[in-house]
Image (spheres, rainbow, N blue to C red):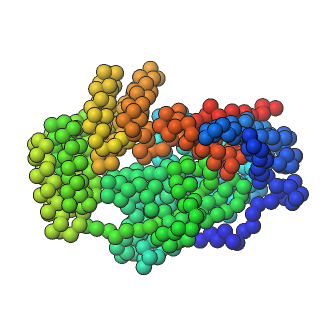
Amino acid sequence: MYDPKMTTAFDDNHDNDTSKSDEPFLVMDLEVVQCQVSPTIPSQIGHPAPETLFNINVDGLRVRTECKSFTYGTPQDVKKAIEELRQTFPQSRVSTDPDVLHLHGSSENSYHPSSPHSVVVQASSTEDVVKVVNISRKYRVPIIPYSGATSLEGHFNGHSSGSICLDMSTMDKILEINEADGDLTCQAGARWEDINSTLTEKGIPLFFPLDPGPGATIGGMVGTGCSGTNAVRYGTAKAEWFLNLTVVLPSGKVIKTRRRARKSAAGFDTTKLFIGAEGTLGIITEATLRLTTRVPTKVAMAQFPNVEMAVNAVNDILKTPYGPHIQCAELLDDNMMSAINAAGLVDRPYPVQDTLFFKLQGSPESIMETSRTVQEIANKYGSSRFEFASTDEEAEEIWQNRKYALMSTLGAHPGTKCWTTDVCVPTSKLPRLVYETKADLAKAGLKYTIVGHVGDGNFHALILFSDEKELEVVNAAVHRLVHRAIAMDGTCSGEHGVGIGKTEYLVEELGEGTVELMKTVKCAVDPLNLLNPGKLYPQNHPNHRRHDS
């Protein structure tokens, strides 16, 4: 496990002058606060440091952040950075192979076009990450973290000025398990499924309940503030599931956000600062996860005449004393059920209706009581079919439908690509949002399926397209969907994050003041804008440029 006390803060030995520092300092005045970077940043790079990175103009109670232009390294600087990476790491861990660069700058899961990096370097420890960050800063080359490669919003796409892809996929070790305390410390590249499998293999009756898509890693889960099918019972990454994080800051310093205690009133929670920051404030290398008791589950399924009936049934179920026994409440719309039948990935077909899939948890007695309550309320809302899996085999057969939703969508429409987007609204607004979205997509002539985490108002639209012309229609439909969700007091993304795909919606959703505060934090922590630039923050400010000489 990494101990920040073992290393010293980064100093500017790169230019043989330890008196020089690239730490930001504040120059304060009654009207303007300026954050500047010392002009003594290594001069051998070939260009001066930008004088002012942001101004905060105080006008009454309004604060505006104006980020000035950043200058990234020249193509020659990028080459020098690659040379130093090769000198620092074994050759097998540094690659400029075009296929490797393409692989690390694109994803089959995403509609965003490929954006290759300049170099890929594989890290195996926090110390390795510090070395890469220092080289990145020395030559002003952006650095993009990469691990599970499951992002749907282009989080690990390369930067146009040239970028270092920091591959952390082999940083996947479980470092410590504290069964008595119910927590576990691991590296950021560990996958949530592997963590739970390890706990099961060791006979430890605990698990980590956040369950996003297969292959997601802890670092990416923290970065996007993810959740999954268990969210109705266990919440999201922004709940208390991460006790602390080890983070490499843009300065090269290493911090640990807090201790392992279950709660702390010592200062504000810096762990939360990095959850949802999408790798723009620091690079997470380790995390301590809170575990919970593994509870027996059973699966049930109910079909409804429409989405409104299905969602209202779930809302009523969650308000009963048996609500806490609902671990998952998943909606698959009629189009999704049709796709599942057509794709043939499940053992038996089901009627094409809006369908809810439940996981019920608890003792055998409480599960049976919960099942009866679920069936009674489902019948009240017009359910035409209810199934309860009494065996593990039956449960697997029913849950296959939810498990293979994305693959079935593509399998039912061969030759197409899929744009997967998500939004989230207050649960009472979900029926209207889904209804209006289905009507809009049908009017646009698009093929689509819908899957939703009904218990928390989150749903995914899987919209298919065959060519660039159809992609433009999809893009417009997604734009309308997001505006529709925000107008209902919702969010542009419940799980996938912002990345490069949803930056334009932040001001509309959060308000100008909140976005300016986010930018202020970014400029203070990463004044050179080297960590995952172009992601998360709306790009009207800052204005990035590069030298072409």
| Position of 506 relative to 209 (above/below) | above
User: Along the line of sight, which residue is nearer the eye, 113 or 22?
Assistant: 22
Taking the spot 28% from the left edge, 54% from the top edge, the residue there is 328
Left or right: 15 with respect to 405? right
The picture places residue 136, in percent across and down from the top left corner, at 72, 49
Q: Does the image show residue 95?
A: no
Left or right: 306 with respect to 44? left
| Position of 247 relative to 153 (above/below) | below
User: Along the line of sight, which residue is nearer the eye, 220 or 371?
Assistant: 371
Of all residues shown, which one is farthest toward the bottom? 180
Name the quadrant of the N terminus: bottom right
Q: Does the image show residue 19?
A: yes
User: Along the line of sight, which residue is nearer the eye, 435 or 263?
Assistant: 263
Taking the spot 26% from the left edge, 60% from the top edge, the residue there is 324
- Tell me where residue 142 sits by quadrant: top right
The picture places residue 237, in percent across and down from the top left corner, at 45, 56
The picture places residue 21, in percent across and down from the top left corner, at 82, 55
Taking the spot 73% from the left edge, 36% from the top edge, the residue there is 68
Count of numbered circles on the image: 0
The picture places residue 342, in percent across and down from the top left corner, at 24, 36
Taking the spot 45% from the left edge, 44% from the top edge, the residue there is 496
| Position of 400 relative to 353 (above/below) | below
- Tell me where residue 459 sits by quadrant: top left
User: Along the line of sight, which residue is nearer the eye, 213 or 341?
Assistant: 213
Left or right: 366 with respect to 97? left
Name the quadrant of the C terminus: top right
